[in-house]
Image (cartoon, rainbow, N blue to C red):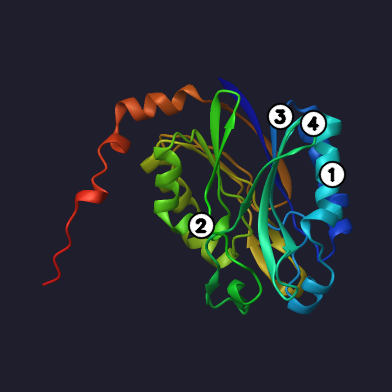
Amino acid sequence: MILQIANCQYTALADDQATCAIVLPMMAEAANKGADMICLPECASRLDPNSASLIANSQTENNSISLAMFRDAARTHKKWVLVGSILLKSETRDDMMVNRGFLITPDGDIRARYDKIHMFDVSVNDGQTYHESRRFIAGDTSVLVNMDGWRLGMTICYDLRFPYLYRQLARNGADVITIPAAFTKVTGMAHWHSLMQARAIENAVFIVSPAQCGTHAGGRQTYGHALVVDPWGKVLSDAGEHPTLTVTSIDLDAVQKARAAIPSLTHDREDNIRLDIV
């Protein structure tokens, strides 16, 4: 099975509608180029470093203007759309948010939701503060979607550093795993390509990672380099550092070929390994 995958790479602004004015034409271009699935990065409609304004100006899923726009675009273009994530108000706590990804059908319906599981609470010495758990409620459920004969696993950004999540998805039949991201420039330069290729190789899956790039409000810099990596670890497309659109052809038969060549998914012994601390 051949799929055409579009990765949208851009610099999200601190305003939903202003960002959507950038994204929607890019989605139309992807559709015109024959994409079967259009993929948007993490923080697809907004990247605002100010916690107070972020919460004050955000909506819940039910009244999200940007989500409605993305659903309309999927319906208009008759394409699958992966919304890497939208930063939404929590339905259960007024003072907290969720970092939620969506898979939207060509009819504009929400097929799946995924709340980012691993919170980015780190210091990378780039002048920014990252403590997502102060304002976001972490998810606790991985998501694998059956899509007309193939399976898509949904993850987000910092999840990349936790291999067990990808192993679970692969062992349950994932052919493609998406990792939409707003990766920092510092960590991206050090680890982005290596980790993306590692997740692809060790699980024999396609990795699709639409990405934010450039300098955002407050001076935050994201790495770009939206990737498509095949199950053998080959980088099929790399969007570079600047806003752009890539459309990449993937052959899902490559998944079974890679797993037949090195059937490591069937060799796991994690439940039978004893640890001796001496």
Where 37 falls versus 200 (above or below)? Answer: above
- Res 24 label: 1
The image position of residue 104, as x and y in percent, is 72, 39
Where 217 falls versus 104 (above or below)? Answer: below
- Amino acid bearing label 1: Leu
Label 4 secondary element: loop
Q: Of the residues under marks 2 and 3, which one precedes in the sequence? A: 3
Where 120 falls versus 249 (above or below)? Answer: below
Label 3 secondary element: loop
Q: Of the residues under marks 3 and 4, which one precedes in the sequence? A: 3
Q: Residue at x 69, y 46 (%)?
A: 102
- Amino acid bearing label 4: Asp
Camera-nearest label, 2 or 3: 2
The image position of residue 39, as x and y in percent, is 68, 42
Q: Of the residues under marks 2 and 1, which one precedes in the sequence? A: 1
Q: For this view, does 180 lie left or right of residue 193?
A: right
**Residue 143 quadrant:** top right
Residue that label 3 marks: 35
- Amino acid bearing label 3: Ala
Residue that label 4 marks: 107
Q: Residue at x 31, y 27 (%)?
A: 261
**Residue 128 quadrant:** bottom right
Q: Nearer the viewer, residue 181 or 241?
A: 181
Where 131 falls versus 152 (above or below)? Answer: below
- Amino acid bearing label 2: Asp
Label 2 secondary element: helix
Q: Residues within 10 Å of mark 1 (few under 14, many from 20)?
A: some
Q: Of the residues under marks 1 and 3, which one precedes in the sequence? A: 1
Q: Of the residues under marks 4 and 1, which one precedes in the sequence? A: 1
Contact, mark 1 vs mark 3 (Cβ under 8 Å): no
Query: How far is mark 2 from mark 1, CA to CA?
Result: 27 Å
Query: How far is mark 4 from mark 2, CA to CA?
Result: 29 Å
